[in-house]
């Protein structure tokens, strides 16, 4: 390890690894520091069940927002498979248990399941029209994610091309998402299902004036212009391993089990003090931080007051399918990766606000 680098990156999550790869390939010297004893941050696979020899995608478990350009640029050898089932939402209708099944592969399956719920074909067509707004938005915005940030007004002008584009901008950017959902959809269960992607991990509601729900929704529907979330064969650990190899191949040095002590950010040179086999100090022209602002504030001696929109939570239980009946037998041709072998995972997203309980969806992902 040297005493000076062009760039020091704090945190070896997927963002830190991607940054290290590009910067190293550009000829800069890079040191990547990680507090954990593993690489990948939230994009990792871990052993969850002590008596079950399987590695689970413990935090992040699907891939959508990793741009295909980055995969090509870094030469990542990843296999991302489609999930046959987009979502399955159980319901009770006139005393009968049933479920709304939306397919990624067969539109007719989705249409028929929606008809069985609503008794008409209108709701399905309206849902398609609503989701088309996010497709239009993604088509105009996604490529800019790897470009210098564009001003909001410039973005708005890009959506001034036709009525559908203007409707996409109004529905997703200017007005609370709940307004558009209520304008397009009539069934409460369908409204709640659609709103799930605006609710995961954040405490918000359909008519939140902060538009936090809009940002959350766009986040879930914009990836690679399709918004589809795919299963990485080998789990998220496979993604992390590929990124680590790319960073090391680009010349980045990576240290784990690092205890960060302090940061100096006031001068032209950034200093990083940490403990790794003894007290260490390195200097860098640039310091990239791959963790939250609340953690950064602690190391630079500043107070941090979180915004109300920073609060949120997600419960993601993994169930050993040897002990629970929710798991289905393995299907021929389905990837034998760590995500699938774990059994089944369920995401329960519950709104804090009592008056928006109807917009709180339950989404079950039976594919992993």
Image (spheres, rainbow, N blue to C red):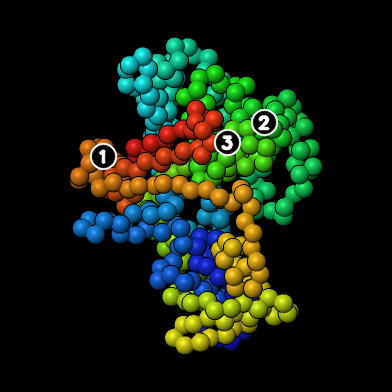
Residue 225 shows which numbered tag?
Answer: none
Give the residue displayed 55% in from the left and 70% down from the top.
10
Q: Earlier in the sequence, mark 3 or mark 1?
A: 3
From what the image shows, is residue 267 above or below residue 18? below
Q: Position of residue 264 (x, y in %)?
A: 65, 78
Cα–Cα gap, marks 2 and 3 = 15 Å
Which quarter of the picture shows residue 209?
A: top right
Q: Earlier in the sequence, mark 2 or mark 3?
A: 2
Q: Position of residue 45 (x, y in %)?
A: 37, 58
Q: Position of residue 94 (x, y in %)?
A: 36, 14
Mark 2 nearby-residue class (10 Å; few <14, some 14–19, many ≥20) = many
Label 2 residue SS = helix
Cα–Cα gap, marks 1 and 2 = 38 Å
Query: Which is more toward the observer, 52 or 20?
Result: 52
Q: Are marks 1 and 2 in contact (CB under 8 Å)?
A: no
Residue 327 shows which numbered tag?
Answer: 1
Q: Position of residue 38 (x, y in %)?
A: 41, 68
Q: Which residue is mark 3?
A: 205
Q: Which residue is mark 2?
A: 171
Give the residue displayed 72% in from the left and 77% down from the top.
266
Mark 3 nearby-residue class (10 Å; few <14, some 14–19, many ≥20) = many
Could you tell me which quadrant the C terminus lies in? top left
Label 3 residue SS = loop
Give the residue displayed 45% in from the left and 15% down from the top.
118
Label 1 residue SS = loop
């Amino acid at each position: 390890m040297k005493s000076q680098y062009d760039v020091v990156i704090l945190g070896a999550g997927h963002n830190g690894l991607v940054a290290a790869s590009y910067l190293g390939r550009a000829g800069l010297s890079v040191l990547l520091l990680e507090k954990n004893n593993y690489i990948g941050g939230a994009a990792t696979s871990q052993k969850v069940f002590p008596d079950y020899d399987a590695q689970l995608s413990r935090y992040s478990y699907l891939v959508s927002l990793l741009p295909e350009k980055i995969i090509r640029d870094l030469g990542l050898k990843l296999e991302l498979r489609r999930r046959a089932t987009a979502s399955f939402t159980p319901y009770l209708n006139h005393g009968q248990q049933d479920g709304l099944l939306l397919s990624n592969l067969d539109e007719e399956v989705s249409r028929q399941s929606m008809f069985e719920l609503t008794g008409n074909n209108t709701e399905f067509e309206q849902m398609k029209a609503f989701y088309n707004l996010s497709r239009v938005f993604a088509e105009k915005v996604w490529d800019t994610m790897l470009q210098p940030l564009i001003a909001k007004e410039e973005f708005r002008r890009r959506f001034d091309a036709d009525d559908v584009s203007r409707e996409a901008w109004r529905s997703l950017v200017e007005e609370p998402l709940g307004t558009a959902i209520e304008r397009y959809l009539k069934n409460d269960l369908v409204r709640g299902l659609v709103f799930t992607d605006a609710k995961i991990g954040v405490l918000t509601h359909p008519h939140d004036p902060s538009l936090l729900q809009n940002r959350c929704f766009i986040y879930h529907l914009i990836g690679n212009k399709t918004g589809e979330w795919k299963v990485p064969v080998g789990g998220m650990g496979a993604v992390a391993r590929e990124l680590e190899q790319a960073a090391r191949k680009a010349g980045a040095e990576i240290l784990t089990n690092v205890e960060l002590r302090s940061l100096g950010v006031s001068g032209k040179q950034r200093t990083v003090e940490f403990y790794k086999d003894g007290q260490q100090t390195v200097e860098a022209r640039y310091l990239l931080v791959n963790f939250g602002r609340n953690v950064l504030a602690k190391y630079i001696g500043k107070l941090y007051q979180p915004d109300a929109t920073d609060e949120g939570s997600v419960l993601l239980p993994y169930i050993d399918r040897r002990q629970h009946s929710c798991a289905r037998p393995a299907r021929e041709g389905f990837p034998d990766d760590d995500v699938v072998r774990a059994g089944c995972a369920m995401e329960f997203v519950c709104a804090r606000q009592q008056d928006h309980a109807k917009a709180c969806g339950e989404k079950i992902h039976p594919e992993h």
